[in-house]
Image: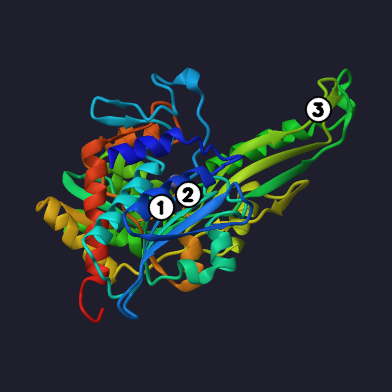
Amino acid sequence: MTQLLRELIRLDTVNPPGNETRVAEHLRAYLTANGVSCELYARVPERANLVARIPGRGDGPRLVLLSHTDTVLADPADWQVDPWSGELRDDHVWGRGALDMKGQVAASAVAIASLAREGFEPAGDLIFAATADEEVGAGFGLSWLCSEHPDAVRAEYCVNEGAGDRVEIGGVPLYLCATAEKATSPFVLDVHGRAGHAAMPGIADNALVRAAGLIERLAAYRPEPRLIPEVAALVATITGGTVPPAGELLAFARRLDARAFEYLEPLVGLTLTPTMASASKKRNVVPGLCEVGVDCRLLPGQPRGEAESAVRDALGDGDWDLRWEEGQGGTRSPIDSRLWDAVTSFVAEIELAARPAPTCLAGFTDSHWLREAFGTVAYGFFPMRTMDPDLAVRLIHSADERAHVDDLELGVRWLRHAALAIGGAPGG
Ligand SMILES: [Zn+2]
């Protein structure tokens, strides 16, 4: 397991440009040697997706172990080790992608390979999909597979990234499982003024200065709190049953602890976060237009129109326009499912006092492609209990990313457990 992850980290798949074919070919060699049949699917030769499977005995439920093989970039100057060394130090595998998410890629490969060696015959196909281009999403990865090769990845159940870490909230040990995700729904705010010479600012109307006030209003926006089912179930798991009304949820979270508040705040409604601004290209020209890029996130299923009303209420009348850009995500899977039962039995097996808790991700993953294309029950769950979850969150997409070898082994154990739970019962 450790060895395979170290090899995958040494294959640079920073996206862009990706070059995920390196990893796909390396995995194919490993899987083929273990008796698992594989297929590479590539829209362009250097960006292949790998799909491997143990065919099912019949038409039982199919499970796909999903992961992505690309990573974000890394600046070696910020790291204690070479980010593409795969160095093993202090019981951790170090390198870009160790947590996000070559660790889970390697664990999935080891899980399906070990099951194949044991002669496992699942009721429905057990599939391992290691896909390209998750970090940018330019149409080379799972979205492309779902539209061009749907039979390769169609499945009733999916285990993907997104959660799984052991956290203590209000003194209760929880393993979080992401059953839903917020949507991204970005827009540009065009703020209009009148251009002029910066030496005589009085005769111009500075769009940048106008934008400043609007940016502050966007940042100050807070939604009317709403209680989505995933958050209700999470809170009920913490309290042992009682759930405060939506309006009291954040006060309740604050009383629990600072982490609970930080975690729940983005899950009670839509958020508006201004992140980009551009105005004049020359210092001596007063800008007639300022473009403000806003990262807007909606609750699963929440229509964009609600965000538009929120923005109009927050900004009031003025000389500005909204331009919506393409959004993504915002899907959910039912909490009550056979895969949920597998999560529950696994958590009981590894820590009797801990409880599994569903949650909604503030961000989004590739799970939404499968949910939208096939109605797949997709969960983000890769358990982690040795590394401090607060540390892990800070290492993802950052310097000194690393994964503890015990967590990687725990991940293999979970993926095998899930495969046996979904595919093990005769007749499915
Ligand atoms: Zn990822």
Question: CB at mark 1 closer than 8 A to ligand 1?
Answer: no
Q: Quadrant of residue 7?
A: top left
| Residue located beneath label 3 in the image | 281
| Residue located beneath label 2 in the image | 24
Please identify the quadrant where the C terminus is shown: bottom left
- Between the C-alphas of marks 2 and 3, the distance is 44 Å
- Between the C-alphas of marks 3 and 1, the distance is 38 Å
Residue type pointed to by label 3 = Lys
Which of disc 3 and disc 2 is earlier in sequence? 2
Q: State the image coordinates of residue 180 (x, y, percent, origin top left).
A: 40, 60
- Nearer mark to the viewer, of 1 and 2: 2
Are the residues flagged by discs 2 and 3 in contact, CB closer than 8 Å?
no
Which of disc 2 and disc 1 is earlier in sequence? 2
Residue type pointed to by label 1 = Leu
Q: Report the residue at 84% width, 35% height from top.
A: 288
Dot 1: element: strand
